[in-house]
Image (cartoon, grey):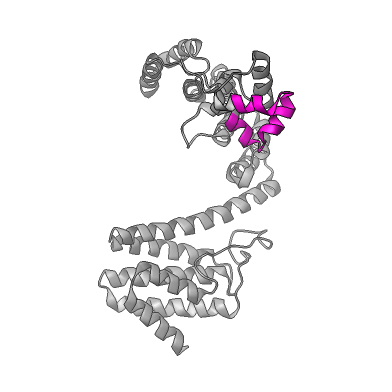
Amino acid sequence: MRLELAENIRMNRKQRKLTQEQLAEILGVTTGAVYKWESGLSVPELDLIVEMADFFDCSIDALLGFRMDDSRLPAAIRRIRSFVRNRDPQAVTEAEKALQKYPNSFELVYFCAMTFFAFGSTPLDANLLRRSLELMERSIDLLPQNKDPEIGESTIIGEMAEVFLLLGEKEKGIDLLKQHNTGGIFNESIGINLIINLDRPEEAEHYLNSAMLKSTCSLIDTVCGMVYVFFAHKDYSSAEDILMWVIGLIKGLKKDAASGLTDKVFAEFLAMLACALKKEGKNDAVLPHLHEASEKAARFDASPDYSIGTIRFVSDADEAIAIDLLGVTADDAILNILNRLGDEELIDEWRDICDER
């Protein structure tokens, strides 16, 4: 067994942006006492540990950093996982037995929550789903123990909302997502459930519009990154394939004939495509794509517009503004792309095309 009280007091204090002096004032102790706790030179009295756990909104075990150095815990998780993999209901029994032994292990509590979720979902078993909810809530209290960067409060909240929806508590599930929708992370789920489960299309449209914009921008950034990866691996055929796909997608997203951000993005991807084609030795297709990129770039730069109102399928994007870090003008962005892809001949070709306008 080992404790991590000193580290956890310091971590929780810093997370709340408190100085040692401020924490000392809250707890009614001296600054020196807090310093000694965080340095491991002394341990606070039990009543102060309880008070700090309450203030930091965590369990006493989590604040203490209580760990059982017991190899049986990993073995218990492996055993439960084996039952889950085979869809053996014995997983539920084994999970409950393990929870009696290790009730304060985040890894086990969260894993068991997911186990009950899996067995309670198909076929639907309300009792197992309720138990899953209890363990998810407990997992949030134990989060300071978590070492998996892909698990956080938001992921657990999303899973809790799914359980409420399965239980038929649709308003409760959707409200939970709304309350924790930081950065719009649940926009898609909220929108889908509003239209499918509550038949509220107007409200759903707002969330789905935001989700559509976010996913479109994310897709464009992802494709751009993948192209650079393909170039690094000299896999120019894959770069061509993904660029042809995303260029077709962008064509379908343009709402009308007016110039807009889609012209700039279109031009940037055309320049990337020209470079990929050159690397593949498909020289006849290089300059036509570069000239088309020039036309789109000149069109955008003549009347730059970073609003997203020209994107199809989005009805309330008038106030939304996109940010393109590749360059202020489309011409600059393409030059930066060609520099990054390292093709001096195409850079010279691009400059000549721009000079000829």
Magenta stretch: helix, strand or loop mostly: helix
Residue 273 versus residue 166 in the image, above or below: below
The residue shown at (51%, 54%) is 218
Asked if residue 267 can be seen in this view, the reply is no
Give left or right: position of 74 versus 169: left
Q: Position of residue 248 (x, y in %)?
A: 44, 65
* Residue 118 position within the rendered picture, expressed as x and y whole percent measured from the top left: 47, 25
Front residue (pair 198, 158): 158
Magenta stretch encompasses residue 34:
yes
Q: Quadrant of residue 315?
A: bottom right
Q: Horizontally, is 143 left or right of 17 in the view?
A: left
Q: Is residue 79 left or right of residue 235?
A: right
Which one is nearer the viewer's eye here, 65 or 111? 65
Residue 233 position in % (x across, y down): 29, 58
| Up/down of 29 relative to 215, above or below | above
The foreground one among 81 and 310 is 81
Residue 51 sits in quarter = top right
The residue at the point 25 percent across, 72 percent down is 281
Is residue 101 positioned above or below 22 on the image? above
Q: Depth check: 192 or 214 in front?
A: 214
Residue 311 visible in the current orientation:
yes
Q: Residue 69: within the magenta?
A: no
Give the residue furthest to the left: 281
Going 59% across and 59% down the picture, which residue do you hit? 313
The range drawn in magenta is: 10-36
Give the x, y percent position of residue 261.
56, 68
